[in-house]
Amino acid sequence: MSIWKTKPLSVLLNEASESEKGLKRTLSSRSLVALGVGAIIGAGLFSLTGIAAAEHAGPAVTLSFILAAVGCAFAGLCYAEFASMIPVAGSAYTYSYATMGEFMAWIIGWDLVLEYALGAATVGVSWSRYLLELLNKYGIHLNPKFICSPWETLTLGDGTVIQGGYINLPAILIVSALSLLLIRGTKESASINNILVVVKVIVVIMFIVLGWDYIDPANYSPYIPENIGVKGQFGWSGIAAGAGTVFFAFIGFDAVSTAAQEAKNPQKGMPIGILGSLVICTILYVLFAHVMTGLVPYYEFAGDAKPAATAFAVTGYTFLQTGLIVAILAGYTSVMLVMLMGQSRVFYTMSKDGLLPAFFSDIHSKFRTPWKTNLFFMVFVSLFAGFVPVSDLGHMVSIGTLLAFVLVCIGVLVMRKKMPDAPRSFKTPFVPYVPIAGVLVCSYLMYSLPYESWIRLIIWMALGVALYFVYGKKNSKLNNPDK
């Protein structure tokens, strides 16, 4: 048995053609773009933008978004080629299985838990912050012990400071509700997501247009604050560290690729969904960050998980403040929906390959969804959302996402060498330069992240390697065809 054995492209394409036995093909190209926008515009914009500005880049957080988008564009072009070639659920995991072998596929599948599951947890924490802000406006005050984790200090809109609680219960409740919705079906979930995306984009545009007149140019001076002598804290290294932090904001476009097996026309729809959502959101991100840091001095966003509400409060449109928060809550909801869906599809595919227990690939007889996987991650994500601070979660998600992008870029190079004549309805342009640039930019952003993020990544991956050799290698259907 070889841990480097690759899964033949013919087998993957055969799996894609058997969709009537498994996942249902219900998603159009427009739904795929909405799926990507739904995942992209969320915590990275409404929450992590403030953290990146206050701790790393200052007003130059706009440059951080551009740098992150460049890395995403290179990786997105590589994702689009793979998604059009291999229209199977599983995203980067599936692509790695076809190019770099089973062990690397396992590594990337395990890494995607950091991206999708912890991504959903990160958004869940920020969702709860905006919910508290909304409830406070109506004089509703929840028990402080049940609205934040034990290791977190929370400052409410009225100035109340909470020094750690027991559990973040609102975050757990929203994760649970969305997990149950996903069990009901992909089409139903996508329909709700489409509505939430429209609301969210309207709010982002409204924030940019209405906030523009209230920008104070003094808040942009200095545009790139001088480095304080520590790598990643302002200066050019701070812009890179900020890009690494907000990279979390771009993970939606690769979540589109996890739905390949549920797309009506994946060869056409995958590239449109991936690249279309990336372009739309990058433009909105840069404009939004420019307005936000122009409304309020960047240092006032330190530790603020609701910076968009903080910034918009200085405008004369106080009557819209409640509407803004409601729309942000709707936007966060769509992000969690896509992240939870993406995670369940990755584990579904890994289970079908025998690398995880059959439990994860059980399809509901009525709804045709991997319902047991949805329930498993409802519990798993809830634990992180309920007990881990948002900044720690955000860094873990970013480094996991960047690692996935690096491997996908390498995968395109390998696939072009191994299977140059395989059908591709979309081809990454300027190979090998685009994939190599993707590897370099994403690796640099990983390097810019805090030391603690690397320690957590190493521990998590070591746990995954141990699990592979204890269970995955022995039960792999590719290496053990008789099982």
Image (cartoon, rainbow, N blue to C red):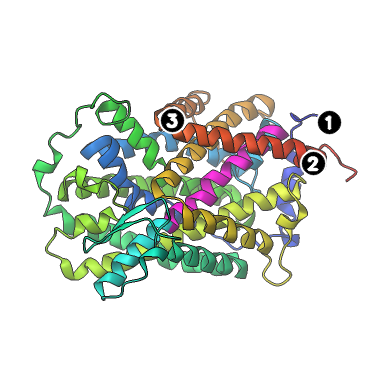
Disc 1 and disc 3: Cα gap in Å? 36 Å
Residue 304 in the figure: left or right of residue 433: left
Which residue is more in the foreground, 364 or 309? 309
Q: Which residue is mark 2?
A: 476
Q: Which residues are magenta?
A: 102-124
Q: Residues within 10 Å of mark 3 (few under 14, many from 20)?
A: few
Residue mark closest to the camera, 1 vs 3: 3
The first of marks 1 and 3 along the sequence is: 1
Q: Which mark is on residue 1?
A: 1
The location of residue 383, given as percent across then percent down, is 53, 56
The vertical placement of 39 against 473, above or below, is below
Q: Residues within 10 Å of mark 2 (few under 14, many from 20)?
A: many
Secondary structure of residue under mark 3: helix
Residue mark closest to the camera, 2 vs 3: 3
Q: Amino acid at mark 2?
A: Ser
Quarter placement of the N terminus: top right
Secondary structure of residue under mark 2: loop
The first of marks 2 and 1 along the sequence is: 1
Q: Amino acid at mark 1?
A: Met
Discs 2, 1 touching: Cβ within 8 Å: yes
